[in-house]
Image (cartoon, grey):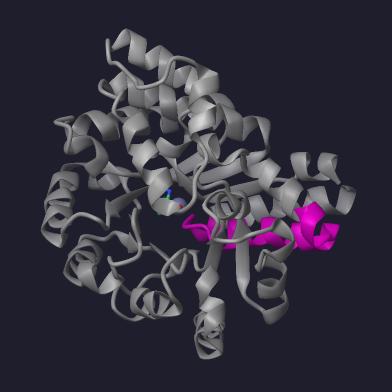
Amino acid sequence: MIDFINKLPKAELHLHIEGTFEPELMFEIAKRNNIKIPFQSVDEIKMAYQFNCLQDFLDIYYQGANVLVKEQDFYDLTFSYLQKCALQNVRHTEIMFDPQTHTERGIAFETVIKGISRACVDAKEKLNVSSLLIMSYLRHLSEEDALKTLQQSLPYKELITAIGLDSSEKGNPPSKFKNVFQASVDQGYIPLAHAGEEGSSEYVWEAIDLLKIIRIDHGNNALQDPILVKEIIKRDFALTLCPLSNISLQVVDDLKDHPLKKMMELGLKVTVNSDDPAYFGGQINQNFIEVQKALDLSKEDLYELAKNSFQYSLLNENMKQEYLQELRTFYKEN
Ligand code: HPA
Ligand code: ZN
């Protein structure tokens, strides 16, 4: 099974680039930028990664991002993640980045986007991994701040496919961002959002109805409302699930209780993703391996999950079909 998972061609659809920041690289970049971090060693960093909830994690995650200053830093962070993709047979990835985490600290939008997108171009050429970018607004900040970010993104619009909504969910409902989502769609960005991770099913309804999203990040709490489940199936929206993230942030108590299999049985389209792999104890394949074991998933289930990852990606139809063909060939032979 492990070998099958490792070789399975797949796409990652829920990944925060700032959440891929491994301690070793963080130390290296902190050193070359002369920035102090509140940890003495890699072990100390790993010890700090014990979270009771989303906010505990976010406090440490934003701290880690503070050492990213130069375009090369964003390049190195991104390329390092894409190398891990290549090793895991992640053929395509849709990368979220949080511009406000950086512009708030005085880093130019241009520095962030140029570093990240240059790594994506190089990865396609050198590693044969394709990628696209999702600009995520931070929901703990104001809508006005998100509108400012939208403006800053416009000169680089061609490099960005979609928008997302992340950070502290509770108390920051989708309705707070209705206007900036509409303005972003008017600019050609595809709307996506985190919803129903810690927030209730009501937040998922809002994300669908008010923000008009076409794919749901997490969405665990959609299960609270059977009418919502029906609606998601009817509209054919996928949920990008992150099993190990859910355990780390105590959204789910035990992997054996993870809703992934139940969702599949209900007819929901779901995918497996790593969210913030450096913080949550595993890359995408580790997520597949652990959830397969906990829920006793069959090869057919895993094939279905991989199929969903391409089918519900934001790629054009031609590229989707190419990857799906590659996946079918693999499945037939394994
Ligand atoms: N939820 C909300 N915000 C985030 C996450 C998450 O899982 N990861 C990075 N920012
Ligand atoms: Zn996330």
What segment carries the magenta color?
292-318
Query: What is the x, y in percent for residue 89?
Result: 68, 38
Q: Considering depth in this image, is 190 or 25 the residue closer to the camera? A: 25
Q: Residue at x 30, y 25 (%)?
A: 68
Q: Is residue 309 magenta?
A: yes
Q: Considering depth in this image, is 32 or 109 the residue closer to the camera? A: 32
* Quarter where residue 117 is shown: top left
- Left or right of residue 315: residue 184: left
Q: Is residue 96 visible?
A: no
* Quarter where residue 91 is shown: top right
Query: What is the x, y in percent for residue 314?
Result: 47, 57
- Left or right of residue 237: residue 27: left
Name of the residue lying farthest toward the right: 333
User: Residue 146, relative to residue 117: is it above or below?
Assistant: below
User: Residue 252, relative to residue 54: is it above or below?
Assistant: below
Q: Considering depth in this image, is 262 or 117 the residue closer to the camera? A: 262
Q: Residue at x 56, y 88 (%)?
A: 226
